[in-house]
Image (cartoon, helix red, strand yellow):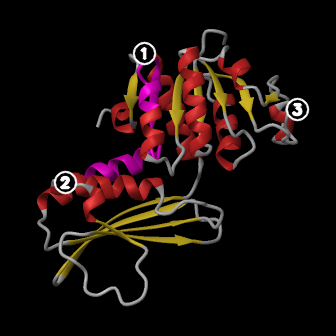
Amino acid sequence: MQNLPGLVVTGASGRMGQMLIRTIAGSGKARLVGCLERPGHAWIGRDAGDCLGGSPLGVLVTDDPLEVFAQAQGVIDFTAPAASVEFAALAAQARAVHVIGTTGLTAADIAALEAAARHAVIVRAGNMSLGVNLLVRLTQKVAQALDADWDVEVVEAHHRMKVDAPSGTALMLGQAAAEGRGVTLDAAMVSGRDGMTGARERGTIGFSAIRGGDVVGEHDVIFAADGERIVLRHLATDRAIFARGALRAALWGQDQKPGHYDMMDVLGI
C-alpha cells in the first residue's frame, strides 16, 4: 500500500471533494494522504472518514497545504480559481502532479498555471469524464466537416448551486467547435441573449445555460441548418465519473515530464 501514490484532496467538504475522498480511499490504486479545507472550517482537525459519516480513514482534515503537499505525489483540486492558482505554485514546489477540475479560470489564472507547469505536471480540464472528452473530439470533427451555414449552439444544464456560466465543459465544447471551423472562440462566441437581439449572425457559436435542482450535468451541441439538425449529447447522472477521471489523470501524471496537459492527453484521443 505504501508504494501507491499519495494523493491530497482540496475542498474536502464540497460535493466533488467528498466524492474524491471516497473514490481514492476505495480505489486500491492510490493512498489518501491529505484533505484540505479553508481556515475555520468545521472539519479542520477531524478524521476525513468521520466527516463523511463512515469509518475513520486515518487522515485528518487540515488548512495547511504546505504540510500535506510535502508528503503527496498528487493533488486533486476542484475548488475556485484563486485557490487553484495558489495550490499550483505549492504543488510545483512539492513536484506533485496537480489535477485541476476548477472552472471559471481567467487568462491571467491560466498564465499562472503555465508558469507552475514548467516545474511540475498539471492536468487541467473543464470536465474529467471520458464521455465528455469523446464528445469534445466529436464536436471538433463535426464542425470541421460542416460550413458556417450550420449554426452551432451549446446548451448546458447544471444544479442550482453552480456559480459559473457557461460551464467549463460548455466552453470546452465551444472551443472544439471553433477549432473545427478554424476560428477563435472569442470572435465567434455569443451568450446571454436577452431582448431584441436581431437575427443570428452567420458563423457564431451560441451558448445557453440552465440552472436548477440537482442536475449533475447535461450538455448538447446542436448543429442546425435549414431543414435538418445534428445533436450531440452527453448526460452525467453520477458525479463519480468526474472523480474516477480525476484519479486516472493523477495516476497518469506520475510518469510524465513537467507540462500543462489535458484529459485528451490522459486518454490518448
Question: What residue lies at 34% left-to-right and 56% top-to-bottom?
Answer: 173
Q: Earlier in the sequence, mark 1 or mark 2?
A: 2
- Residue 223 lies, with reference to residue 2, above or below; the image says below
Secondary structure under tag 2 reads: helix
Q: Earlier in the sequence, mark 3 or mark 2?
A: 3
Cα distance in 3D space between marks 3 and 1: 33 Å
Cα distance in 3D space between marks 3 and 2: 49 Å
Q: Which mark is residue 255?
A: 1
Q: Which residue is the site of mark 3?
A: 46
| Residue 135 included in the magenta stretch of the image | yes
Residue type, label 1: Asp
- Residue 243 lies, with reference to residue 114, above or below; the image says below
Residue type, label 2: Gly
Q: Which residue is the site of mark 2?
A: 180
Left/right placement of residue 107 relative to residue 183 reads right
Residue 25: % across, % down: 69, 29
Badge 3 crowding class, 10 Å Cα cut-off, few under 14, some 14 to 19, many 20 or more, is some
Q: Which mark is residue 168?
A: none
Q: How many marks?
A: 3
Instruction: Give the residues in magenta.
Output: 113-138
Residue 122: % across, % down: 46, 28
Secondary structure under tag 3 reads: loop
Quadrant hosting residue 76 = top right
Q: Decide which of 29, 74 is in the foreground and name it.
A: 74
- Observer-side mark, 1 or 2, equals 2
- Residue 227 lies, with reference to residue 173, above or below; the image says below
Residue 56: % across, % down: 85, 29
Query: Taking the image as drawn, is residue 139 in sight?
Result: no
Q: Quadrant of the N terminus?
A: top right
Q: Earlier in the sequence, mark 3 or mark 1?
A: 3
Badge 1 crowding class, 10 Å Cα cut-off, few under 14, some 14 to 19, many 20 or more, is few
Residue type, label 3: Arg
